[in-house]
Each structure stands twice: as structure tokens, then as C-alpha cells.
Amino acid sequence: MVYDLVIHDGLVVDGSGRPVFRADLGIKDGRIVELGPINPDESVHRIDASGLVVAPGFIDIHSHSDITLIANPRAESKVRQGVTTEVVGNCGGSAAPFLGLAKDQEAERYGVDIDWRSLAEYLERLEEGVAVNVAALVGHGTVRQCVMDMEGRAPTRGELEEMKELVDGAMRDGAFGLSSGLVYPPGRYAETGELVELCRVVAGHGGFYASHIRGERETMIEALGEAIEIGERAGVPVQVSHHPAKIGAWGRSVETLAMMDEAQSRGVDVTCDMHPYIGGSTSLSALLPPWAQAGGPERIVERLRRPEKRGRIRLDMMEEKVPGPDPCGLVKRGMWEKILISAYPEDWPIGRNLAELAAEMGVDPFDAYFDLLEVSGAAGSVVGFYYNEEDIRNVLRHPRSMIGSDGYALAPYGVLGGGRNHPRSYGTFPMVIRKYVMGVSRPELVYDEAAKVVSLEEAVMKMTSLPARRLKQGDRGLVRVGCWADVVVFDPEKITDTATYLDPYMYPTGMEHVLVNGVAVISGGEHTGALPGKPLRLGSGRS
Ligand SMILES: [Zn+2]
């Protein structure tokens, strides 16, 4: 037999952006070896793809699956979307290095036993079997924690040297770059100069800098300016994470995209990623000012029982001197209709927004919120719709934006089955196609205003060749002879996300086949149990 597998008569969207064309695909030893008319008798296996799109497997440029892939290597919620490569270690947090003072809350949460220290050892652990390919970033917050724990100060010269050595070691082990999360401790304690120094090490290895920038709301312009400055001073490409502006910066994507273009014209390689969801979730009590959350649920409820405390909390929430989670930006602006109860010990408020609940309870929204906390013992979660549809569309249209879920490889069963309250881990890639290529809305997703914003060819490019180029993986992200056979087969009219904010653990539908390195992980819409993914290392692919 000439081929292991032939995908017959598909509509090839090859990832480069070129218009769709009809072809057969021949696969042998994990690679695409033929693109053109193929005699079906020459293959062991055959997929009939007539009427279906055949595209490169999606590369999730912004994922947090470091630990969840160890907890369940089948990568269910991702591979069913068509994701064949996960880029982990984002927002400053990575599973490795795990040394010194490092702790890992994810590992504790999922009962994963950390038996690695270096990134090399973590990647070896993945080699024991994982459904998708994995490219790892090294997290600045993680490296800082290894050396300085959570201390809120600048590093000494010696500590900075230690951090540089850890970054250097991770890059030698195959990391693709450094990530930062500059709104979270300990990342937020770092000044620009510290990041420049660490990024110089990354530049020396040809990696990139991915940043959850220092502010995505009122201070977004300065924060983006810092990321570009780091790129320029360190000589490192910059990937701006989950870019569209949040509340407080709505409408400013026009400026931020212009800043990226301007930097690009000066030779700083700046790209960004995004997911299509306009809402994000947090716990019900997280909207309170930090001091009012201290001591845990019982103390919170005690405070809310005292009217004078309620008054102070209300004022602090309106001022928001200490920036809280993003829905706090909605509270401060009185946009209670954009905050929805997504989990609660009782059923009645679930799925309803705080403006309507307040009207029903006959109190103002602050008191409705306080009462809900008091009754529930400070339990529950909210979804805040703090992104702006126009900004999401602007970023999606931009030629250098990519798709990244900002989610996890999860599964509705087992240890990964509960507690994560966001549908993006299950729906990002199908949602982009459904909402912005096909223009189909899902009313149950709330504020889901669909429109045809990009072509299928453009959308696929943002999911495949653009991230592959950022990773310097020249033999992935394209349907081209010689490339690895990371391939998806789907019907663009049928593919859809089904997860919602209230029911996030729902697999998407319409993804018929997913091959990773030539091996079927999804076949006829079902997971085969195969684990053909590989840990990737910077410099390992043809660039
Ligand atoms: Zn982030």
C-alpha cells in the first residue's frame, strides 16, 4: 500500500488563506505525502470527505492545560473542537520549572503528583501519552515564585540571575518562549526592566514573549505600550494574550491595533490572540472589595449583616480603588444587567441578571447582590459580560490576530468534570466558525450577536498557520505535502459549540474526524482513545 490513509474528495482549506479547493489527501507515516487525485485502492484506510472541509488541525495558541493534560491525557474538550496542538504555560503560570519555592494550585486541585522539576522532565512525562501535541511556554510568575516565592518587591541582582538561569534552562529544554501575567501576583510585582532582562534570554534562543498585559481595562493603552517596549528592548516577538478590550477600554481596539501596526512597521513583531466569548466568570463574592472578602464566607456574611459595613462596601465597589476581577468594571458603571448568576445553592436566581433580580426583590442592585451573598453563605458564581462585541470583531478582522481559547483541556467526567465555569474550554474554535464565519447566533449563549466577519479561509488561517509561524513550526498548521498530518474534517454548516455559561461542560458537535500526527483521535465524532500527540520543542519543526 502506498498510503496509510486517504481522505477522499474533501474541500481543502489549507491554512494559508488561499481559497478552498477540492483534493484527495494521502497520509503515510504521520505525514501528508500527496495532495491531488488518489486512487482509493492504494490506501489501507479511507475517509470519504465529500462535502466536508479538510483543514489543518487547530493550534490553540493560548491554553492553560499544563496540568489538565496530565490529569486526563485524552484532551477531550479540546480535541473535539479540532485542536491538535495546545500551547500551554500562558499568563505567567507554567507547570515547569517546579523548583525551590514553587507551588502548583492546579496540581493540588486535580490531585496530580508533580514528579518533574525541569521543563524537560515535564515534557518527558507528556511523552508517556497525550492526545494532542503540546508546545510549552515558561511562566514568568512560576520562575519568580521558584526563586522569590510571592514576595512583592524587585529581585536582588542574585535573584534576577537565578531567574535568568531558570528561563535559560527552560528554553534549552524546548520552551517556545516566556509568558507573563502582570495583573496576578507575583507577576504584577515585576517592573518592566525585570521582564526585559528575562526576555533577552528568550530572544537568544529565538523564542517569543506572550503577555497577559498589566491592564486590559482603563489602563490598557499603557499596558500594551509596556509589552511593545519589552519586545523592542529585548529584541523578542510579542504575543498579546486574549486581546480585545474589556470594560473601561471598550472601543479602544482601534487604537491598540494601530499601536501594534505601528510597532510592526518599526520592526517589532507583534501579534495577538483572542477568543470569541463576551462573558467571563468569577465567584459571586469576588465582586466585593478585597478587604470585604477577607476571612472567608462566614466573615463576609457577618459584614453584610451590618448596614454601616454594607454602606462602605458599596462605596468601595463604586470607586474600585484596587482593581478587582473584570465584572467589577460593570458594577462600577451600574451595568448590573450584564452580570448573570451562573451558580447558586438555590435554583431561582440562576441564569438571571442582577438588574432583573433587584427589580423582583424590590431593592436596588447592590442590596440584591448583598442579599444573595448573605442567603447563600457567600457561595455561587457570576458571569459578567465585560467584553464588547465591536472590539472582538475588530480584533478578529485584524490580519495578525489568532484564535486562542484561554481555556483548559477538560472532560465532563472524572477529576476534570467540575468547577470550571466557562464554556470556552469546550467551544472556542467551533464558535468562531459558527458565529463569525457562518453568522449563526445562539440565543441561549446570551448577547450572542452573530455576523459574517471573516471567511472560512481567514478563520482557519488564524487557527493554524499563523500560530504555527509564531511557534516556528513550519511543518504544522498547513495542509501541504511534507507537513505532519494534523488534520480536521468537518461540515462548516453543522459545526457548532453547544456549551453555555450555565452548562459549560458540553462537547461541540460537527467535528467528524481529527488526526494528530496521522492517527485518528476523533473518528465519526467520537474519541478513539488514541494518544498520538507529541511534546514539541522550539527548533524541532522545519521553519
Ligand atoms: Zn490571562
Image: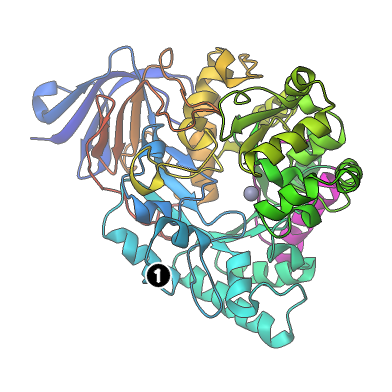
* Residue 476 location (% of width, % of height): 40, 43
Q: Give above or below for 345 relative to 352.
A: below
Whether label 1 lies within 8 Å of ligand 1 gets the answer no
On screen, residue 223 versus residue 349, left or right, reads: right
Q: Is residue 119 left or right of residue 397?
A: left
Q: Residue at x 26, y 47 (%)?
A: 532
Q: Residue furthest bottom?
A: 158
Q: Name above or below for residue 412 compared with residue 130.
A: above
The reply to whether the magenta stretch includes residue 236 is: yes
Start and end of the magenta stretch? 218-247
> Element type at marker 1?
helix
Q: Nearer the viewer, residue 25 or 355?
A: 355
Q: Position of residue 218 (x, y in %)?
A: 86, 43
Give the amino acid at mark 1. Answer: Ala
Please rate how many residues cluster around mark 1, counting C-alpha atoms within 10 Å: few if below 14, some from 14 to 19, many from 20.
many
Rendered residue at 55%/40% (across/down)? 404
Q: Position of 195 compared to 503: left or right?
A: right
Colour theme:
rainbow
Q: Position of residue 283 (x, y in %)?
A: 64, 43
The residue indicated by pointer 1 is 120
Q: How many marks?
A: 1
Q: Can the viewer see residue 400 in this picture?
A: no
Along the line of sight, the residue nearer the viewer: 113 or 439: 113
Near-viewer residue (19 or 373): 373
Residue 335 point in image, percent of width and height: 81, 27
Q: Quadrant of the N terminus?
A: top left
Task: Place residue 48 in its image quadrant.
Answer: top left
Q: Is residue 300 magenta?
A: no
